[in-house]
Amino acid sequence: MAEQKKQEIYNICVVGAGHVGLVAAACFAELGNKVVCVDNDKKRIEALRKLKMPFYEPKMEPLVAKNYNRKTLQFSSSLKDSIKKAEVIFLAVGTPPLEDGSADLTAIETVARTVAENLNSYKLIVEKSTVPVQTGKKVKETIYRYKKTDVPFDVASNPEFLREGKAVYDFFYPDRVVIGTESKRAEEILKSIYAPLKAPIVVTNINTAELIKHASNSFLATKISFINAVSRVCDLAGADIEKVALAMGLDKRIGSDFLQAGIGYGGFCFPKDLEAFIYISKRLGYDFDLLKAVKDINDNQQKNYVEKIKEHLWILKKKKIAILGLSFKPDTDDMRFAPSTAIVNAFLSEGSQISVYDPKAMPEAREMFKGKKIQFCSNLYAAVKGADCLCLVTEWDGFKKMDLKKIKKIMNYPLIADGRNMFDKDKVTGLGFEYLGVGK
Ligand code: UDX
């Protein structure tokens, strides 16, 4: 483990005002650095200057406002100017998935080229977006190819492990900071930037740092698929997955995190990062069959969930299905790769009537399901009124407090399909509901 370094103040440019970029920019500014967050989406930058956040993330808005007002954080749509003024440039641009599972690295290449063309003083270019292993090498080659001066530069990888919904907390209290670089100067700068966090720092080469990110996300997804596969056996054997997970998790070698069985993982990280890791491993010459199984198990969780409800209700056509929770997990409005979409689409293809409610993701849901016959409701009770099945899809805290007696009265048929094992089975069956959990 590397030793801590004294903090200095840096001129930082964060390229990309998405989840990773905006949170990192605000947090670097909070640590006292002078930060400019750049995005080529002018509307987003204009809105940020009016302190309008592009997405919901707890604790982010006050941090952005505080640092924008005290001028440690600025927003710009001019990449060139921002690069010229910065010493450290964090790349937090999108790396969306392509058809074949590989990551589209066009935005990374564009920024690398722009850095090369505007290399007016020493710059450290740091990859923060999740990128395939060996991208750092390509970034370096690109800058060498297009630079017009002999001004020195370094490239480093500093993968981001923050979770949506807990991003600000994760930034300030990381389990570890990974610094991948072959340059002592770059290592010292990054150690100094992260010094106030007092987190363990792992220093390694760029390829290893990139691989740490692939391996960490894939391992977490594997843990979820493992417990979901066990939940299927629990269903068949009449065992209780929650007790299985509890007892497994007490073994310190296993740990209790990420053993929550449900309808599978979603979001913009796990599904896309898994695909990208499978793809890059194959390209390098290794067939990562384990990860293919992880992905299949995840897809099947959603299919199995709908299948279970179908078995129970027999015919789904014209039945009213209330979907509670649409975001891929609580405390975010993000619906990218959310399990709810596969579930809603499966019910739609069965001819069911769908009503939906989510505390934060309704605008995203309207956009995503545009043109589909769905009733968008303003609260959970409106969604479950007259329903034949209440599908609990995202375990929002507010849902835990729902008035089940009232729900029982207003539903057409009292069936709860608890996709996140949020309810106490004995309690809800005691109130007269029929209950379908995951592996219990
Ligand atoms: C994840 C990683 O945790 C983070 O380190 C990385 O930087 C980005 O990807 P995030 O996508 O925000 O973060 O969500 P996370 O909290 O990890 O949950 C991912 C998905 O797994 C969610 O859909 C969640 O519902 C599901 N999940 C999580 C389970 O189904 N069971 C669990 O036990 C844990």
Image (tube, grey):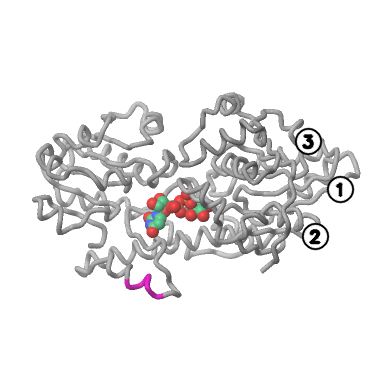
Cβ of disc 1 within 8 Å of ligand 1?
no
Residue topped by disc 2: 184
Residue topped by disc 3: 85
Locate residue 155, reporting x and y percent.
75, 51
What is the crowding at mark 2: few (fewer than 14 residues within 10 Å), some, or many (at least 20)?
A: few
Q: CA distance from mark 3 to mark 1?
A: 15 Å
Query: Amino acid type of disc 2?
Result: Lys
Quarter of the figure with the N terminus: bottom right
Tell me what residue is drawn at x 52 percent, y 28 percent.
52
Residue topped by disc 1: 152
Front residue of 282/439: it is 439
Q: Is residue 249 magenta?
A: yes
* Magenta residues, start to end: 247-251
Q: CA distance from mark 1 to mark 2?
A: 13 Å
Locate residue 77, reporting x and y percent.
67, 28
Tell me what residue is drawn at x 32 percent, y 67 percent.
230
